[in-house]
């Protein structure tokens, strides 16, 4: 999974500890998610995107073929730009 949470935290000047508090999970858990040592549940990703005030899709790095893989079920999802 290619998550951009670390990059977004850096851009917004928010610490992992602050994010953990906003999301309501432990600092250790959020650190593992940020460092991609654990895969977050889909509802946790939603809470993270809300806490960072970014669309859910912004948490994922877009591969060249514009496909992301759902962290919950492994389904490939095609990412399309709004027209």
Image (cartoon, rainbow, N blue to C red):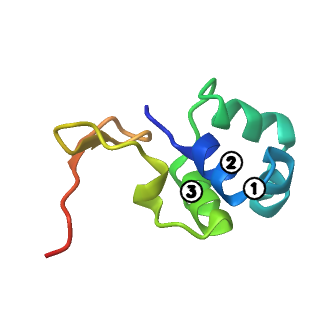
Whether residue 24 sits left or right of residue 64 in the image: it is right
Q: Badges 3 and 2: C-beta atoms under 8 Å apart?
A: no
Label 1 secondary element: loop
Question: The C terminus appears in which quarter of the rendering?
Answer: bottom left
Q: Residues within 10 Å of mark 1 (few under 14, many from 20)?
A: few
Q: Which mark is residue 22?
A: none
Question: The N terminus appears in which quarter of the rendering?
Answer: top left
Label 2 secondary element: helix
Instruction: Choose the circle earlier in sequence order: 3 or 2.
Output: 2
Residue at image location 43% in from the left, 41% down from the top: 72
Q: Is label 3 or label 2 in front?
A: 2
Instruction: Choose the circle earlier in sequence order: 1 or 3.
Output: 1
**Residue 71 location (% of width, % of height):** 43, 39
Q: Is label 1 or label 3 in front?
A: 1
Question: Which is more toward the observer, 12 or 58?
Answer: 12
Label 3 secondary element: helix
How far apart marks 3 and 2 lie (CA) works out to 23 Å
**Residue 33 location (% of width, % of height):** 65, 36
Q: Which residue is disc 3 drawn over?
A: 43
**Residue 7 location (% of width, % of height):** 59, 44
Q: Which residue is disc 1 drawn over?
A: 13
Q: Which residue is disc 2 drawn over?
A: 10
Residue at image location 40% in from the left, 57% down from the top: 57
Whether residue 30 sits left or right of residue 74 in the image: it is right
Question: Which is more toward the observer, 65 or 75?
Answer: 65
How far apart marks 2 and 1 lie (CA) works out to 5 Å
| Position of 38 relative to 19 (above/below) | above
How far apart marks 1 and 3 lie (CA) works out to 23 Å
């Amino acid at each position: 999974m290619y998550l951009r949470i670390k990059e977004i935290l850096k851009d917004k000047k928010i610490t992992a500890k602050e994010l953990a508090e906003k999301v309501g999970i432990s600092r250790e858990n959020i650190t593992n998610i940020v460092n991609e040592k654990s895969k977050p549940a889909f509802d946790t990703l939603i809470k993270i995107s809300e806490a960072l005030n970014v669309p859910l899709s912004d948490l994922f790095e877009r591969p060249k073929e514009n496909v992301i893989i759902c962290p919950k079920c492994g389904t490939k999802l095609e990412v399309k730009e709004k027209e």
